[in-house]
Amino acid sequence: MIRVGIVGATGYGGRELLRLLLAHPGVEVVAVASTSASGEAVGEVLPAFRKLCGLHFETFDADSLAARCDAVFVGVPGGQSMATMAALRAAGARVLDIGADFRLKDPALWLQYYKKEHTAAGLLPESVYGLVPFYREALRGAQLVAVPGCYPISLIVPLRPLLDAPLGATPIVADSVSGISGAGRTLNEAFHYPEMNENLKAYKLGVHQHVPEIEQELLNRVTVQFTPHVAPLTRGILSTITVRPEREFDPAPYYAAYADEPFVRVLGPGALPEVKHVRASNYCDFGWHHDRRTGNLLIVSAIDNLVGGTAGMALQCLNVMFGLDESEGLRFGGMTP
């Protein structure tokens, strides 16, 4: 039995992680830490876990967590996990960060996009990017895992196999629509019900913090024009990707390697995904269409931002790290309707 702890279990990503871990037959959740809820029963703060989790939230103590846990998940807001992760690594813990702090390898890019100095840059070389289809072997021995961002997963999975295709020099255009839970639990007037109901809006054009992560994991071989949108959905991401190739090509052979990937579903030409088919699951679905009028290749992908884009990918990483069947605790489809 793998003993795990969660730091920051009251956020949306942390809650989903707790939900998945409590149902995992090979995992025991032995500790949950939260600054805002220390001393309170998990089931009182998070009623969904009544009769499922008898733990109380505790104050963060790196040495105590490292002594009791085989692995610790950190789910605090971006920019806040650096100190937490550094303390846990110093205590000898294997750690998985579902935040953004260890995804970028270049601390200068971190400063540019996140507007703060990286205080644990010395740990960046040991960080393994937790996108399982591409880093499975490195994850087996990883001590520090940076779980990918939700938008990047929806784009990297369909695009990275195409890097050796004749993509051309035109920037790839990616338009992604996310549910409101992607903004987290922090109160923000922009995401209040009257502001978002029957509304759809773009934000952070050209400056979104996921841009360097996307291009890094596309091996800096392409430029991506990324525009995120938020919609009045609770969860889910639908991404539409426009590629202007040098010439028309069949993407199917480039995706052959995904045949054995448990959570990548290649729908094929003309078949387009929907967020309801991946809701609350770990799947990434995508299909494509050749627009012969414009010469563009259009790819559409769908993930659940809280599971396939956060907690589910984190759990899949844990399974790989500890030699378990990587689909353990994740064998369920989307919630429809």
Image: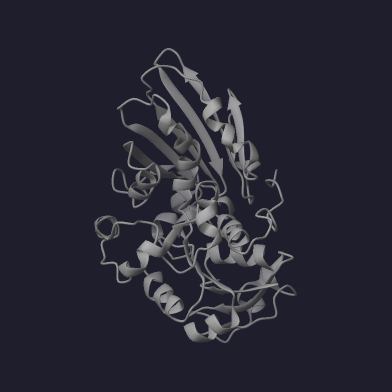
- Is 164 situated left or right of 330 in this image? left
Q: How is the image coloured?
A: one colour
Q: Is residue 242 visible?
A: yes
Front in this rendered view, residue 63 or 55: 63
Coordinates of residue 241 in the picture (x, y in percent):
44, 32
Query: If the image is split into quadrants, where does the N terminus sit?
Result: bottom right
Residue at the image point whose x is 69% and y is 75% from the top: 53
Image quarter of residue 127: bottom left
Q: Residue 14: x, y in percent?
A: 55, 66
The answer to whether one can see residue 74 in this image is no
Q: Horizontal and vertical percent for residue 103?
A: 40, 57
Query: Looking at the picture, how far across and down is residue 34, in whole percent?
Result: 51, 78
Eyeballing the image, is 68 above or below 239?
A: below
Q: Nearer the viewer, residue 247 or 77?
A: 247
In this view, the residue in front, 105 or 279, is 105
Marker count (numbered): 0
Side (left or right) of 50 relative to 224: right
Name the residue located 61 percent from the left edge and 30 percent from the top edge: 267
The quarter of the rendered structure image containing the C terminus is: top right
Question: Where is 164 relative to 82, above or below?
Answer: above
Q: Where 27 falls versus 220 (above or below)? A: below
Q: Is residue 218 above or below residue 109?
A: above
Residue 85 found in image quarter? bottom left
Image position of 197 (left or right of 222): right
